[in-house]
Image (cartoon, rainbow, N blue to C red):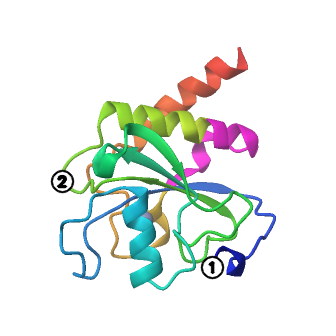
Amino acid sequence: MMSDIMRVNLLPEKVIVHHGGPDPKGIYDGSWPHCAAYYKRFHTEISGKEDIGFHYVVENGSGGTKIGQVTRGREEDMEGGHAKGMNTKSIGVCFAGSFDKEAPSKKQLEAGAELIADIVVRHGLGVEDIVPHSDFTTGKTCPGDKFPMDKLKGTVEKKLKKMKR
Ligand SMILES: [Zn+2]
């Protein structure tokens, strides 16, 4: 139930970047596409969360989505369910897909950079505040070994400079 999630007047200090990742528990039958609807099902039916854990999902074209389409998860003033210890002070952005073996498409990355630039500006954050989930976990590669964090941050930085002009 959405109402069980705390509204915390969340004042984010970080934007935490995730991927859908590989099947973490061996439960998926492999037929579910990587998209927000699938993550919501996983988080609510299998992980026991009240709702999808992320604030946003940048779609990759799977499950009837459009590449780069942004699906809202939790509202921004709601505590997240995506990074233990950081859920009350970060916005969780998931790039749909699994990026341990391949990078996201240019179009998906670009759309994610656009979204994150907007979040960063609205919350008075900087490019240095865009961080991978793996910074806060042990044993997780999230958002994946092949995810280009530097490229994402560089693209956000360019967008921020354009916005300031
Ligand atoms: Zn993650």
Looking at the image, is 103 positioned above or below residue 158? below
Query: Foreground: 122 or 60?
Result: 60
Task: Report which quarter residue 145 is drawn in.
Answer: bottom left
Residue shown at the point (71%, 37%) measured from the top left: 121
Residue 102 vs residue 60, the one in the foreground: 60
* Amino acid type, callout 1: Met
Mark 2 vs 1: CB contact within 8 A: no
Residue 107, picture quadrant: top left
Left of 136 or right of it: where is 149?
left
Give the distance between the C-alpha atoms of the residues marked 2 and 1, in whole angstroms.
Answer: 35 Å
Residue 153 visible in the current orientation:
no
Name the residue tied to disc 2: 101
Q: Which residue is mark 1?
A: 1
Quadrant for the N terminus in the image:
bottom right
Quarter of the picture for ligand 1?
bottom left
Give the residue at x 77% y 70%: 7
Q: Residue 84 location, x and y as percent?
A: 55, 77
